[in-house]
Image (tube, rainbow, N blue to C red):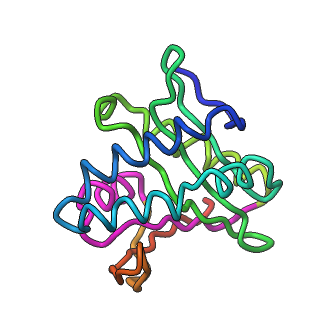
Amino acid sequence: MTIREASDDDVDAIRDVARASWEADYPEILSRETIEEGVEEWYGTDALHEAVSDARTRLLVADEGDAVVGFAHAVLNGEDEGDILRLYVHPEHRRQGIGRRLFERVRDDLYERDVDRIYAMVLADNDLGNAFYRDLGLERVTEEETTIGGDAVREHTFALERG
């Protein structure tokens, strides 16, 4: 497995990983319609192409063979802070360390850009995602509301200080 910067050729595969992850992780949190709207809103073709070319964005993919099996999407949100907006591994490829490797790579990339504090967002009811960030040493710092497909949902923000 390799982790590399995403290209425009990866846009459809990233959206496929997001859709499969949301369908596996969120059926009791979000309706099927909200999942579909959210995937299109957050992972639309134009938005992903923009993320690929934005210098303040880190969009990384995990490749296994010729297939994208996971991705991490982070942005610089200030002079010394970065946000991990999304980190997903296709449900069929979980429990192999891919998520950890994606996290470590995006964390290191942000540190190379002089980021001292990293935030990561995850839906409050996504037990697997919350446990993932806690296991990596991040601390939950806030719980706020976000909107997905017009529905309000709770979201946790985790933080990691550069040590």
Q: Is residue 126 magenta?
A: yes
Spot the residue most to the left.
28
What residue span does the magenta drawing correspond to? 115-137
Residue at x 45% of width, y 69% of height:
158
- Residue 32 falls in which quadrant of the image? bottom left
Q: Position of residue 49 (x, y in %)?
A: 71, 49
Q: Position of residue 9 (x, y in %)?
A: 67, 32
Depth order, front residue of 137/147: 147
Q: Is residue 130 magenta?
A: yes
User: Considering only vertical position in the picture, is 63 above or below 20?
Assistant: above
User: Considering only vertical position in the picture, is 139 above or below 73?
Assistant: below
Depth order, front residue of 150/144: 150
Depth order, front residue of 98/136: 98
- Residue 4 falls in which quadrant of the image? top right
Residue 113 horizontal side relative to residue 63, left or right: right
Residue at x 54% of width, y 55% of height:
43
Residue at x 50% of width, y 45% of height:
15
Residue at x 75% of width, y 69% of height:
80
